[in-house]
Image (tube, rainbow, N blue to C red):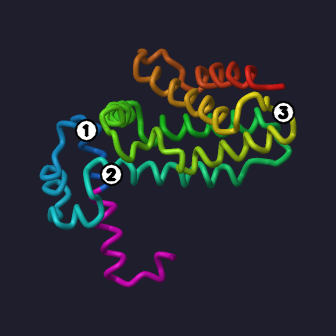
Amino acid sequence: MLTEQLTPRQKQALQTKKKILETALELFSKKGFDRVTVDEIVKKSGVSKGAFYVYFPSKYDVFLEKFKEIDDFYADFFETLSQELTFQEKILCLIESQMIYLRDELGKDLMRTVYMSGLIQAENNFFTNTDRKLYKIIQSLVTEAQKNKEVTIDLTSNEVTMLITRCMRGTLYDWQLFEDGYELLEESRKFTKAILRGIQI
């Protein structure tokens, strides 16, 4: 539904949700996920606790909402990829766009908080959610590449997809561990190319 078609009440609801989301992410980035309470989020955002729970069942769902936005970015970027590119080129382009987006839009501090919270969250963990658009996009590329005999069929498409996404997570995790000299794009390319060489026919 286009914003222009929304009623004033619906527009207000979207603005409230956006305000809660931005406030929570800002607090998570500054203080760490575990040190931020729902009470603090609602106080700083100027909304009621009831309003918070209308949009977010828990503070962890704020992260899930943000990752839905990120996955929408991946989906939009995927649509721009030329069909003339090889499987390796498509994967490298996708991962490069991911690294740039996470580095520039979320930043290292917030990504560190995301990873820390992901380690303690048992349910609805976005890292292990294979229904995410990102997983579906990569799996579709892998399936196509296997049909075109670009990628080994010794592994299932799901196994290959898990290897590639593990490469993404590993690169981002190392970004948290190492000092500012760690070049995210350069390291992601090296790691990804090494993995892709291992699954090519």
In this picture, is 182 found above or below 84?
above
State which region is magenta.
1-20
Residue under pointer 3? 150
Q: Where residue 152 sits: x, y (%)?
A: 79, 29
Of badges 1 and 3, nearer the viewer stands 3
Assess whether mark 3 and mark 1 are in contact (beta carbons under 8 angstroms): no
Q: Where residue 189 sits: x, y (%)?
A: 65, 24
Q: Magenta segment: does it hold 3?
A: yes
Labels 1 and 3: the sequence-earlier one: 1
In depth, the one of 152 and 141 nearer the eye is 152
Estimate the spatial distance between the alpha carbons at disc 2 and disc 1, rounded to whole Å.
Answer: 11 Å
Give the residue at x 48% y 34%: 103
Q: Where residue 166 sits: x, y (%)?
A: 55, 29
Which amino acid type is shown beneath numbered disc 1?
Phe
Q: Where residue 35 sits: x, y (%)?
A: 17, 37
Residue under pointer 2? 62
- The quadrant holding residue 43 is bottom left
Give the residue at x 47% y 20%: 174
Which amino acid type is shown beneath numbered disc 3?
Glu
In depth, the one of 49 and 2 nearer the eye is 49
Residue under pointer 1? 33
Estimate the spatial distance between the alpha carbons at disc 2 and disc 3, rounded to whole Å.
Answer: 39 Å
Labels 2 and 3: the sequence-earlier one: 2
- Disc 3, SS: loop
- Disc 1, SS: helix
165 sits left or right of 88 in the view: left
Is the residue marked by circle 2 packed among few (<14), some (14-19), or many (20+) residues within 10 Å? Answer: some
Which amino acid type is shown beneath numbered disc 2?
Val
- Badge count: 3
Of badges 2 and 3, nearer the viewer stands 3
Estimate the spatial distance between the alpha carbons at disc 1 and disc 3, rounded to whole Å.
Answer: 42 Å
